[in-house]
Image (cartoon, helix red, strand yellow):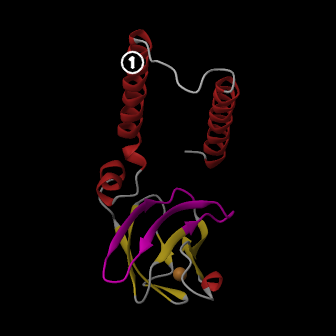
Amino acid sequence: MNPRLVFWVLLALGAVWTTVWAFVLLRSRAGPAFEVIEPAENRLRLRLLFTFGLILLVTFALSLRAYPYSSFRTRALGAPADSVQVMAMQWGWSLSRDTVPARVPVAFVVQSKDVNHGFAIYTPDGALLTQVQAMPGYTNRLIYRFDRTGTYTVRCLEYCGIFHHFMLTKFIVR
Ligand SMILES: [Cu+2]
């Protein structure tokens, strides 16, 4: 999904949320501290609870395709056609290759030598594309398909020590 669209949707939802709560807060000062909940009000509350619960569940189910978990990505994109071994360490990245094919699913097999790091891939124009944790003693697979060629940047998204900000590398998609 377009990151700019996500930003504006979240901002709009945040504004609605803040307005509703400001309204509730302002109104609550006028009434008594405790109110008896009438059965009709209670039914309305339950109906709203189940409605919003259902909306949440459906949204969750529909957005599973976008999850970074490898089984969801494999189902959405197909089995990976290529793979890159990624090792994270204080403070750098070691990638088994520096070029990656475009328009096929690629598996990044991500591990860490020392502490937790965040393996994050940025587009040539600097937008965050996808990310996964790099953890010691654990292998994470991040499957992604690059539709655009160019030079992508890898940054660490988990603070991992004093030179965390130097932790970046690049690879080429072609
Ligand atoms: Cu790091």
Residue 41 rendering spot, x and y as whole percentages: 45, 14
For residue 16, side relative to residue 145 (left or right): right
Using the image as rendered, state which of residue 118 and residue 102 is in the foreground. 118
Is residue 174 in view? no
Residue 142 rendering spot, x and y as whole percentages: 39, 66
Within the image, what quadrant is residue 39 found in? top left
Quick one: SS at disc 1? helix
**Amino acid marked by disc 1:** Arg
Ligand 1 has an atom within 8 Å of the beta carbon of the residue at disc 1 = no
Using the image as rendered, state which of residue 11 and residue 19 is in the foreground. 19
The residue located at (64%, 26%) in the rendering is: 28
Using the image as rendered, state which of residue 115 and residue 125 is in the foreground. 115
The residue located at (61%, 63%) in the rendering is: 123
Residue 127 rendering spot, x and y as whole percentages: 64, 60
The residue located at (46%, 18%) in the rendering is: 36
For residue 65, side relative to residue 21 (left or right): left
Q: Residues within 10 Å of mark 1 (few under 14, many from 20)?
A: few
**How many marks can you see?**
1
The residue located at (41%, 42%) in the rendering is: 63
Look at the image and give the residue range highlighted in magenta: 121-148
Q: Which residue is mark 1?
A: 47
Residue 56 rendering spot, x and y as whole percentages: 41, 34
- In the image, residue 31 above or below residue 168: above
- In the image, residue 105 above or below residue 67: below
Residue 95 counted in the magenta span: no
For residue 94, side relative to residue 54 (left or right): right
Using the image as rendered, state which of residue 136 and residue 109 is in the foreground. 136
- In the image, residue 85 above or below residue 62: below
Quarter of the image with the N terminus is top right
Is residue 168 in view? yes
For residue 4, side relative to residue 148 (left or right): right
